[in-house]
Image: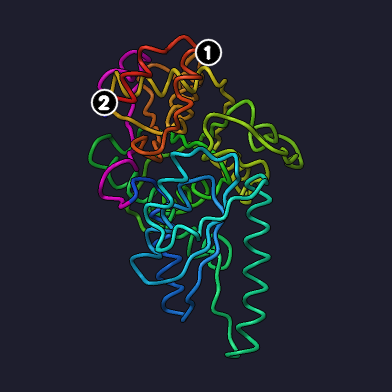
Amino acid sequence: KSKVIGKELGIDLYLKLDTTKELPTRSFKDRPVSLAFNRALESGYDTCYVASTGNLAISSAYFAKKTGIKVKVYVPKSLGKVKKDAIRKYLPDPQDLIELDLSYDDCNIKAMEDCDRANEESVKKTGRKTNFVPNNSFRPYYKEGSKTSGIETALQLKKLISKDKTVNIVYPLGSGALFCSAYKGINELRTLGLFENPIRMWGVQPETCSPIIDAIGKEDILPIKNPRTIAKSIAIGKPGSGHQALDVIKESNGGGFKVTEKDIFKATIDLYFKEGIFSQFVGGVTIAGIIKGVKLGLFRNGSVVVANITGAGFGRIEDDLLEYAGEFGYENEAKKLLI
């Protein structure tokens, strides 16, 4: 439960942390990637191709090293040095990090194309495919892994609140897959009679990259080319589960928020100094969205709100932190964070 921020906002705020050592690379990506890799092992695959803005690549590199699966990681050249180093830390061979002068979405296309070509060769040689993209080749399994976020949230809340309370669950949105999968997990518990609380799902995106939020109430999602935001792990201009996310928002009577870069930065700082949680900037996206929801009167006094903090800041936040800090007027706080 929040120690400070919830009281300041007048809401019953809970923080769902995917920043702790229970997840080996301290990001929610360990949930879907572990299941995709297990399925790959069961099916006899031996090589992984993956594109990432950081966390997916770090998790894939970790599980590749643990399982002996070969891995090729594609990242935008613009990705910060800190995250590149975090990926290399787990790679069996540092040369397997391939930097491309492309956006994440185009890196993703390149990874899938190279995987398809490799499979054509493996089929010729062995009669079967041996190469996979964890978030594509095994996407149903990948999303089932993400489902555990919603299942854990619901089962933990059961011990903390009365069953008649409406729960507002807030996630940062990149591809939208985690958001949709968590909702699926909660609804499955409801079907089994293991969870009764009404839930409303809320998504948050940076103003500079908000294709899903911009599409709420509209017929289609307009892709964003070369999206830029300090919350780089959700800088996805063409969200693979975007339409599903819109369906979840509508079905749960939820909504969405766009937040500024300054608000993201300030919320990340507040999360550390007020709650003792050092998250990536994507954690600031979630908190900034909740603050906006309170200001708009959507989260009222006493509302139960769950903030999903999806990745740790240790070894992930870039050196440009001070550059942004100076721009936004938080240089002293940023220096303490880096220490």
x and y percentages locating residue 243 in the rendered image: 66, 47
Q: At 58% across and 43% down in the image, what residue appears?
A: 251
Tell me if residue 30 comes above or below residue 196 in the rendering: below
Q: At 46% across and 73% down in the image, what residue appears?
A: 40
Tell me if residue 48 comes above or below residue 293 in the rendering: below
x and y percentages locating residue 87 in the rendered image: 43, 50
Q: At 51% across and 37% down in the image, what residue appears?
A: 80
Tell me if residue 243 comes above or below residue 90 in the rendering: above
- Disc 2 + disc 1, Cβ < 8 Å: no
Pointer 2: what residue? 276
x and y percentages locating residue 235 in the rendered image: 59, 38
Other residues around mark 1 within 10 Å, as few (<14) / some (14–19) / many (≥20)? few
Instruction: Tell me the kind of residue under disc 2.
Output: Gly
Callout 1 secondary element: helix
126 lies left or right of 198: right
Pointer 1: what residue? 327
Q: Quadrant of the C terminus?
A: top left
Magenta run includes residue 123 = no
* Badge 2 or badge 1: first in the primary sequence: 2
Q: Quadrant of the N terminus?
A: top left
* C-alpha distance separating marks 2 and 1: 24 Å
Q: Quadrant of residue 198?
A: top left
Which residues make up the magenta segment?
Answer: 2-24
Depth order, front residue of 316/140: 316
Instruction: Tell me the kind of residue under disc 1.
Output: Glu
